[in-house]
C-alpha cells in the first residue's frame, strides 16, 4: 500500500474518532411522572429536566430520542444497555455511584412529608411509625422508609411495618393516595411535592416537618460512558452563561424550595 494511502486512512480514522457528538443518536430515558422535573403533557414529555437536557444536547451537538418510563426502571435500563443516558430527578447516592456514572449535580433537593391539611397527628418522620406512608418505588425516600422499618423491626408493635409502606410507580399516584385517603402521609422529593401542592392539590395537602436527607440530582450514564464528561461540561456552561437560570424560572418562578 502506498505511503500516501496509509497516511490518508490514518487521518480519516482519526477524524472519524473525533467526530462531534451530533453524529450520535442516543436513547435517553426519562421518568414519566415526576412533575415538574419531567412528565407527560399532551402526548409529549415536558419538564425542567427535559428543557435542561435539550439545552445541554444543543451545546453537545447531540441527537437523542426520549424514552418515557417508570422511575424505578431508569437505572436498570441504563445497566442493561437499553439507555445511553437517564434524566428524571435521580438523586446522586453512594449506592447508585457504584453502578452508574453521574454528571455534575444540577439541582439541590431533599425529602419532605406531605399530609392532608386536616392532619394534625403527623409533624415529623418519627410520627410515621404505624402510619400508612406512600412513596415512589425505587426512590431515595423508599430506601429511607425501608431503613427506618429495619431499624425498628418490622415485627415490633408500633413499627412502620412492611405493610404500612405503600409503593407507587410515580409521584402523582403517590400524592393522590394521600389526597384521597389511601395513605396517611407521603415522603417524597421536595420540589415535586411543592409543585403538586401548588398546581393540583386544590388545598387538600400540606408539607410538615423539616427537609430530610438533603441531596443533589444528576443526569445518569452507564459506567465508563464518554457522554458523562461532555454532559458535565455543557451543564456547567449553561450555569455560567445564565441559560440554566432562565430554565429554572420557567418551571419554578419565584417559588421557594423550602416549606418555611
Image: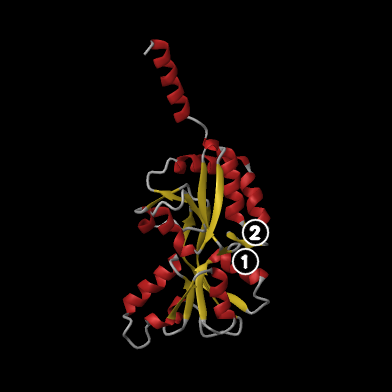
Q: Position of residue 212 (x, y in %)?
A: 46, 67
| 84 vs 46, nearest the viewer | 84
Residue 239 visible: no
The circle on residue 205 is none
| Residue that extends furthest to the bottom in the rendered view of this protein | 157
The mark found on residue 252 in the picture is: 2
Question: Marks 1 and 2: in contact by CB < 8 Å?
Answer: yes
Q: Is residue 204 above or below residue 62?
A: below
**Label 1: element kind:** helix
Q: Looking at the image, is 116 positioned above or below residue 3?
A: below
Q: Which residue is mark 1?
A: 195
Quarter location, residue 126:
bottom left
Determine the secondary structure under disc 2: helix
212 and 30: which is toward the camera: 30
Q: Residue at x 44, y 53 (%)?
A: 82
Q: Is residue 202 left or right of residue 22?
A: right
How crowded pointer 2 is (Cα within 10 Å; few <14, some 14-19, many 20+) is rated as some
The C terminus sits in image quarter: bottom right
Amino acid at each position: 500500500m502506498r505511503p500516501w494511502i496509509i497516511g490518508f486512512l490514518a487521518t480519516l480514522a482519526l477524524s472519524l474518532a473525533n467526530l462531534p457528538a451530533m453524529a450520535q443518536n442516543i436513547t435517553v430515558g426519562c421518568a414519566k411522572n415526576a412533575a415538574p422535573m419531567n412528565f407527560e403533557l399532551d402526548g409529549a414529555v415536558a419538564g425542567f429536566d427535559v428543557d435542561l437536557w435539550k439545552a445541554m444536547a444543543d451545546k453537545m451537538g447531540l441527537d437523542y430520542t426520549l424514552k418515557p418510563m417508570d422511575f424505578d426502571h431508569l437505572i436498570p435500563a441504563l445497566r442493561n444497555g437499553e439507555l445511553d443516558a437517564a434524566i428524571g430527578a435521580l438523586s446522586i447516592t453512594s449506592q447508585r455511584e457504584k453502578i452508574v456514572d453521574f454528571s455534575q449535580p444540577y439541582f439541590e433537593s431533599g425529602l419532605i412529608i406531605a399530609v392532608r391539611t386536616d392532619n394534625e397527628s403527623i409533624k415529623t418522620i418519627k410520627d410515621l411509625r404505624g402510619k400508612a406512608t406512600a412513596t415512589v418505588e425505587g426512590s431515595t425516600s423508599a430506601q429511607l422508609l425501608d431503613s427506618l422499618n429495619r431499624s425498628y423491626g418490622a415485627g415490633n408493635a408500633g413499627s412502620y411495618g412492611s405493610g404500612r409502606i405503600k409503593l407507587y410507580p410515580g409521584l402523582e399516584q403517590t400524592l393522590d393516595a394521600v389526597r384521597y385517603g389511601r395513605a396517611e402521609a407521603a415522603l417524597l422529593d421536595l420540589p415535586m411535592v411543592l409543585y403538586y401542592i401548588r398546581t393540583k392539590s386544590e388545598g387538600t395537602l400540606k408539607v410538615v416537618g423539616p427537609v430530610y436527607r438533603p441531596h443533589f440530582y444528576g443526569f445518569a450514564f452507564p459506567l465508563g460512558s464518554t457522554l458523562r464528561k461532555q454532559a458535565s461540561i455543557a451543564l456547567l456552561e449553561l450555569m455560567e452563561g445564565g441559560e440554566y437560570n432562565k430554565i429554572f424560572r420557567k418551571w419554578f418562578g419565584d417559588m421557594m424550595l423550602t416549606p418555611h
